[in-house]
Every structure is written in C-alpha cells, then in structure tokens.
Amino acid sequence: MEDQEAQKSSRVVKVDSAESWNFYVSQAKNQSCPIVAHFTASWCIPSVFMNTFFEELASSYKDALFLIVDVDEVKEVASRLEVKAMPTFMFLKDGNTMDKIVGANPVEIKKRVDGFVQSSHIVHIA
C-alpha cells in the first residue's frame, strides 16, 4: 500500500512501453512542455541512487514532464535514442533531444534542468 501511495504523489511518470513513450512525448509536444527523461536499470546502483533525486527535481519543476524509463523494459526506446550507459538523462523539447547527461552527477543535472526549463519558458512565452 505504501508504494501505491508514493506513486500517486509522484510527479515522475514511469514509461512501460514504446507506445507510452510516444504518447507522452506527443502530449508534451502539443503542450509545449519540456521533458526530462531518466534512463535507468534496476541492476545499476548509480541509477537506483538517482531515483530519489529525480523525484525531488520533479517536485521542484512543475512545468516540465519527468519520465523514467527502465532500459531493460523499454529496449526499443533506449536503442532508438542511443542510450548506452546508465543513468542517462535526456532533455527533450518538441520531441527532439536538446541535451544529454550520462552518469550520476546531481549538481550538474540540477543545473542543466534549471537552465533547460527556464529556456523552455522563454521560448514558450515569447
């Protein structure tokens, strides 16, 4: 029950198929919403370590869509986006990859998310 309650309050959306990935990317594109995607694997300790941090980021940036993708469950998307190491963080705007960070570097990821979300607003408002 606790896991279900945690999931309800989470702002991070778990992608469980290529179809759901395409749906979320399409929805975000239609709404001019930036996407921050965390490509992870359950066996990768640095990836698992970043999950809590990613949840905190999602809570801080309400105007972006935060997706989490397990590369073993959604291989097609990971392959298409050339994700070769975990964790990988991708920043997408209008369905296009704008930036990518490979590795568990919370300070750099937060800095990039901040800049990415702010620049997305400037473009959107202008």
Image (tube, rainbow, N blue to C red):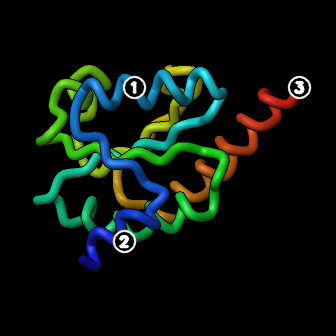
Q: Is residue 77 above or below residue 45?
A: above
Among the 4 quarters of the image, the one containing residue 54? bottom left
Q: Residue 103 at what x, y percent from top left?
A: 34, 53
The extreme front residue here reads 1
Q: Residue 64 at what x, y percent from top left?
A: 60, 44
Quarter of the picture holding the C terminus: top right
Q: Amino acid at mark 2?
A: Ala
Asked whether 30 or 72 is in front, the reply is: 30
Ranked by sequence position, the earlier of labels 1 and 2 is: 2
**43 lies left or right of 26:** left
Q: Is residue 23 above or below residue 54?
A: above
Q: Amino acid at mark 1?
A: Phe
Ranked by sequence position, the earlier of labels 3 and 2 is: 2
Among the 4 quarters of the image, the one containing residue 10? bottom left
Tell me the element at label 1: helix
Q: Which mark is residue 126?
A: 3
Please give the name of the residue rendered at 43% of the width and 54% of the height, measured from the top-left corner. Answer: 12
On the image, numbered disc 1 is attached to which residue? 23
Tell me the element at label 2: helix
Q: Residue 123 at what x, y percent from top left?
A: 79, 27
Q: CA distance from mark 3 to mark 2?
A: 37 Å
Q: Which mark is residue 6?
A: 2
Q: CA distance from mark 1 to mark 3?
A: 26 Å
Q: Residues within 10 Å of mark 1 (few under 14, many from 20)?
A: few
Q: Is residue 111 above or below residue 8?
A: above
Number of residue marks:
3
